[in-house]
Amino acid sequence: MGCLEPPLIPVQYFFANILYMNKIILTLLLLISLSRFTMAQSDNSETSQSLPGGEIRRGVFLPTNAHDSAVWQEQRRKQQLLQIEPTGKPEPSHIQIYIDRYKKMAVYDPRVLCFNIKASYQNGKITLQGMVSLEEQKVGLMQMMDILHFTPLLIDKVEVLPATSLGQERYAIAKSSHVLYYSHPYGAREKLTESMLGDRIFLLKEDTENGYYYAQHSNGYLGWIKKDDVLRVGLPEFQKWRRGKRAVFQRNYISQDSSLYIPIGADLPIQDNGMILIPGKDPASVPSEYVVIYDCNPTPIALRMLDNAKEFLGVKYVWGGVQNQGVDCSGFVNSMYRSIGIILSRDADQQFLAGEITGWRGFIEDMLPGDLLYFAAPNGRISHTGIYVGDGKFIHAQEPVVRYSSFRPTDPEYDQKTVAKFVFAKRVLRMIPQITEK
């Protein structure tokens, strides 16, 4: 049997197939061009990152329309209720379980923000007792009680720190070379961290019965410390230990009579005559080879960073952005520090963990240009950040654009709403001592 020959294709069908293929190729090319255009737009446009009527932030859709927002708020309340009580039917007898679940939701890091609440249910009443670091944390807790429909049952004994009973002397200087921080002032407890000689400490509450203070290390860490280990002072004395010329110890120092021990890393004020201030003792003369000297002044690198920041003025706020096509608050801070060779974490609540506390609500006098500023959300979580410029002003990315704002009511840039949320300033940059080879 011979080979079968392929059937003949009429010429008109042949050309028709070619035209059909050309249409397919042109369509594909058009789609590729459109996809590239869309990708380019997404890199440079806030609207491309948004959904119709809002956008997604931290996994939650936030509407922009006022009517939609009211509907969203009600939906959000229902979601929060189900997070706390999956059945949707809260039981007052489960109140401590609900408190613990809420703490995991609302408190980013209990090592640096206190949220110590005990709850009980007796005789038809819910008693909340304990302490929190911020007023916003208490407000958020009460809002959650309202979502659970427990507000009529509440007896509120929650204290916002620092305790008013401390009066004006709410500060301390470590006068021991080892000031230990504990999880509790008595009983079985965990050692959390320690302060060294000369460290600045914020007092939050006093336990007169056991001889302890609940305190916050200048790096933010919380715990109970022995009263006898610190020198309790008012704000003016506290400022003296934070300002001026300082000596950083490069190795452990022990005096000839062994009465004074200063650990490596201790950071102590130094007088004009070269004597080093020792908390609770007379000033000491220490050989120069043990220390390097620096001043608490704005650093040149911080001033350079703030000059760099001017490039972002007027740049629109874009959630998730880090460049001048659009930037969010922590992305702006991250990029500015990156411009001087320092890598910070990405988000504000992560950045908050770094550095030394230099300012707090109601006190900004010791802040220096370049210090990082942190602001709280209504539930107390750190939700916004900016950079202190000096003279009461700061620069930050906040909708709609990057701009200067001020703490001072007399300034045109005064931002009352944002300033009311301010909780802490922290210093990552400080003058680096000039260390010579030994």
Image (cartoon, rainbow, N blue to C red):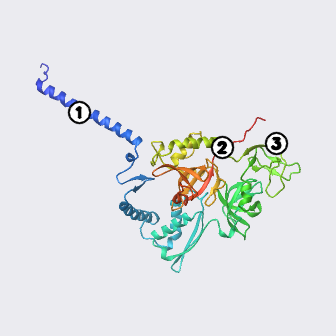
Give the distance between the C-alpha atoms of the residues marked 1 and 3, in whole angstroms: 81 Å
Earlier sequence position, callout 1 versus callout 3: 1
Taking depth in this image into account, of 129 and 291 the one nearest to the observer is 291
Residue at screen point 67% across, 61% down: 215
Q: Indicate which disc, 1 or 2, sits on the residue closer to the N terminus.
A: 1
Q: Which residue was labeled with disc 1?
A: 24
Foreground: 8 or 58?
A: 58
Query: For numbered disc 2, what is the local secondary structure?
Result: loop
Quadrant of the snapshot with the C terminus: top right
**Badge number at residue 288:** 3
Residue 172 visible at all = no
Left or right placement of residue 163 versus residue 333 in this view: right
Element assignment for label 3: helix
Nearest the viewer among 306 and 159 is 306
Instruction: Name the spot of residue 84 as percent of width and height, x first.
Output: 47, 65
Q: Which label was assigned to residue 299?
A: 2
Q: Quadrant of residue 132?
A: bottom right
Q: Amino acid at mark 2?
A: Thr
Query: Percent position (x, y) of residue 379?
Result: 51, 62
The amino acid type, in three-letter code, at marker 3 is Ser
In the rendered image, the quadrant that contains the N terminus is top left
Observer-side mark, 3 or 2, equals 2
